[in-house]
Each structure stands twice: as C-alpha cells, then as structure tokens.
Amino acid sequence: MMVVGVLYFTWIYWSPINLLTTGEVGVFPSPLLLLINTILYIPLISALVRKWLSVMTRRKGGPAGGIDTVEPGRGVPEPGDEWGRATRLYKAKDKSRIIGTKSEFRETIVPLDSSFFVRTPDLETGEELFDVEELRTRAMIRSCVASGGWIHKRVRSRSMGSLKASETPQHGRPFRSRMPLGEFGSIDIPSTVMAAVGRMGQFKPVERIKVKPQDIREKVFSGRTPLTIILVIDVSLSMKPDRSEVRKVISRIERETRGSKDRVGIVAFKDSGAIEVQAPTTNWNKIYRGLAQLRISGLTPLAEGLMKALETIRRERMRNPDVEPLVIVISDFAPNIPLAQSAGPGHAQYTPVRDLVKAARLIRKSDVRLVAVNVDAEQVRWIRFLSRPYHDALELATMLRMRKDGRQSVTETIMAVHDFRQSFGAYLIAMTAGGRAYLSREVLVLDSVLGEFLGASKRRVRLDARTLKEAESYIT
C-alpha cells in the first residue's frame, strides 16, 4: 500500500496530462486535473499490480518466490494439500509437561517414586535467595538494636511481645473478668462465686453455693505476650522472579520482631519436601544464618511446607503449652508436588491442591493462626478489577461463581474452576485455615504488619445477598 501511495503522488505531480494542459510538471494540479489524473491512475496501477503478482508466482526462488494464489473454481483437494507444500518435513511434537497449570500435573519432570519423597531438600543447590554479605552485615549490628535506634519500632513493644495479652488465655496481668468467649481460659474464682450468688439471691448460711456454667467468669489480662512466628518460605524455582518481594516482606517482619521476645523460626520447602532451617528463636543472628542457607531450585511441595510448620508448632507446645503460634506462608501458591502419602501405590492421580486443603484444615483444627502472603505480582489484577483488598476480591469472585454454578461449597467451587484452582491458592489456604490472604505489596504499605496479621485471625468477611447482587450488576 505504501508503494501504491508513493506512485500515486508521483503520478499527480509528473503526469503527462499536466504537461499537455498547463505546460508545467512538478506542480500540484488544479482540482479538475487532479480528478482526471486519479481516474487514469486507477486502471494503470491495477494492471501493474496484476503483472507483478503474475511474475512473482512464476519465480522458483529469490525474494517473494512462490507467492500463494487462490485458483478460480471449486476447491478440490489434491495430494499434498493436507500438509501443504512445505520445504521442511512435518514432525509432530510431544506436548511439553511444563506447559499448563502446575497444579494439574499428572506426570512431572522428576519421577515421583517412593525414593523421591525420602530425599531431604538440598539447600545448597540453586541461586541464593538473600544477599549473604548483607545478612552478615546485619548480624554485626546488635548494639544499635538494643538501644532501639536502628529499627523503627514502637518503644512500648520492645522487650515484650506483639500479641495483646487480652487475646490469650494465661498471659499478662489480670485486671478484670468476663464471660468466656469460647473455651474456658483462666477462671476468675471470686467473680464466678459472685455471679453465682447474684443468681441465687438470698440464701441461708448453711446452704451451699451452686455454680452453674453461666456463672463462670474468666480473667482478662493486660500487657503483651510473645508470639512464635513460623516463616514458611517457598524456595522453588518459580520464586526466582519474586526474590525481591520475599526480601522486603521478611525485612518488614524483622523490623517488628527484632529486639522483642517474639520468637521466629524458618521452614523452607522445595523439591521433595520441607525442612526446618531454623527452630524458633529470638536471636536474629541465627535467623540470618538460616536465611543465608536458602537457595532457589526445584519443584513446589506447598502442602509439605504447611505440615512441617505444624510439626514445629507441636514440638514447641510440648515444651510450653502456652505457645501462641503464627504461621506466615510466603509463596506464589502454585503447588505441583502432593504429600508423600498421596503419591503412594494405589493413587492414580497426584493431588497437590487437595493435599493443600487437607494441611490447612489440620492447621485450623490445631488452633494455629495462619496468614498467606502471595508474592505473585500478576495477582494484582483481582484488586483492580473488583476494587477490593486481595482476600476480599478473591472471596467475592468465588462467591459469584458459586452462585452461578449452583454450588454449595467455596472449596468445591475453586476445585471445579480451572482458573481458580490455578491462581486462588493463597485464598484457599487462608480461607480453609481461618486466616487471611495478602499480596506482598499490600503488606509493605501497612503501618503494623503483625498487628494486621493478628487482627486478621479474628476477622471474618461476610458477603450478604445485596453485596453479591451489586457486584453481579457491576460486572455485567
């Protein structure tokens, strides 16, 4: 088209018609001459194009050799039409096992035999997740931390924990009583007796006080109590583009825990399973040494990471029954390796997502707080589309699809929808475990990360029919 246009303007300026009528060329003609030149140009350029195509189709090689043309008449297949007259022989390619949803793997690159799951993840293989020199520099700075000048942390929480004592059963100093909100904590005997007396009214001195369940009061404590934080970090190969996000999230957690009595442990998972890199401790120098060991490589056994974190918490509770755990899962939530017991003989399919649900249910049953932090930047589209925080947006999308399909369970809906099963891993874990899911960019702008995480363990999002109806009309 560009060549046709250039030739058109050349014809207008240098047409022989201009020379015969005005005696000049190279000058823009009058409207009448422009119309005459255009009428004459159309058949000339049409004939030129047909001649060029005819010459090109007869050429055997060179530029534009063998241009395909549509032959007149009915299209009757001839020998060779099914593959085309290609210069290279056609060779069918096997479908790559890597393409597609990681959660849909039925055959993996590494054979999942019995020996695969007994291997310990190799932390020395792969690229470093953290800058080792930077971690070593941080470990040397302790005097500044003790004075509170290096970390931007509130003074009132230094040398204490991050969890309010009123949210725990037996920590802090009691200052009042209340009716039990759930299971009985520390019973306030004087308040319980007074409640029983008030219920019974006047009674004889020889009459015994009868305490009933509605009379029981528990103590409410003031102050703060330490947390036991388990960082469950994904170090599989899919985390390579998101290394900076992982570093930022852990740096924010460090700012709010270092210098306090909060204990932090590290569980890493990749390849065949998970491993406890660092037991819970208040010494961040040990935590730095654990972070320096992390290397990115291999597959994503996310369910094994949750089970290893639960195993660590159970061991801590054997030492101290009053441990207050918080599991923070940092991953892109795309599992492709199931639990070892799900890959044994007799199991025809691998089920990494279903095993993820099983592990999250065990965490909720064990009364463990859980927060899922997704570092996948592409997930921000749900926030922009539904104009809600990450967890609320995914919950709304799931509820809308559940109503559309006529299903009764959120978990069933996510399992049935391919796109949801592929990208809703963080919400699935958080919803099943009774926690909340966040994007890493949401976490980084919070004033208090641990405060938000602890508040999320008590907050439940309830979507009523009106909200769903408004969302449906908005999306439509």
Image (spheres, rainbow, N blue to C red):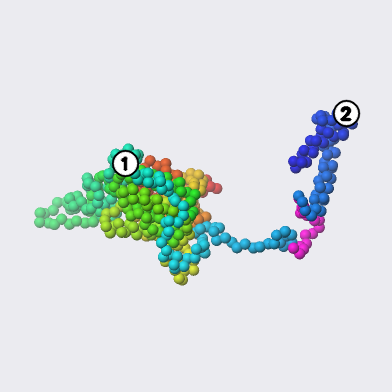
Q: Specify whether 366 is left or right of 349.
A: left
User: Residue at 83% of width from left, 33% of height from top?
Assistant: 14
Mark positioned earlier in the residue sequence (1 or 2):
2
**Closer mark to the observer between disc 1 and disc 2:** 1
Give the position of the N terminus as an image quadrant: top right
Look at label 1 and name its amino acid.
Val
Q: Specify whether 398 is left or right of 4.
A: left
Choose between 455 and 10: the one closer to the eye: 10
What segment is highlighted magenta in the picture? 64-80
Q: Which residue is mark 1?
A: 145
User: Residue at 64% of width from left, 63% of height from top?
Assistant: 92
Mark number for residue 23? 2
Magenta-highlighted stretch: main secondary structure?
A: loop
Choose between 271 and 107: the one closer to the eye: 271
Q: Residues within 10 Å of mark 1 (few under 14, many from 20)?
A: some
- The single residue placed furthest to the left in the displayed view is 206
Q: Is residue 468 visible?
A: no
Choose between 311 and 197: the one closer to the eye: 311
Q: Is residue 18 visible?
A: yes
Query: Residue 168 at what x, y percent from top left?
Result: 28, 50
User: Residue at 41% of width from left, 65% of height from top?
Assistant: 118
Q: Secondary structure at mark 2?
A: loop
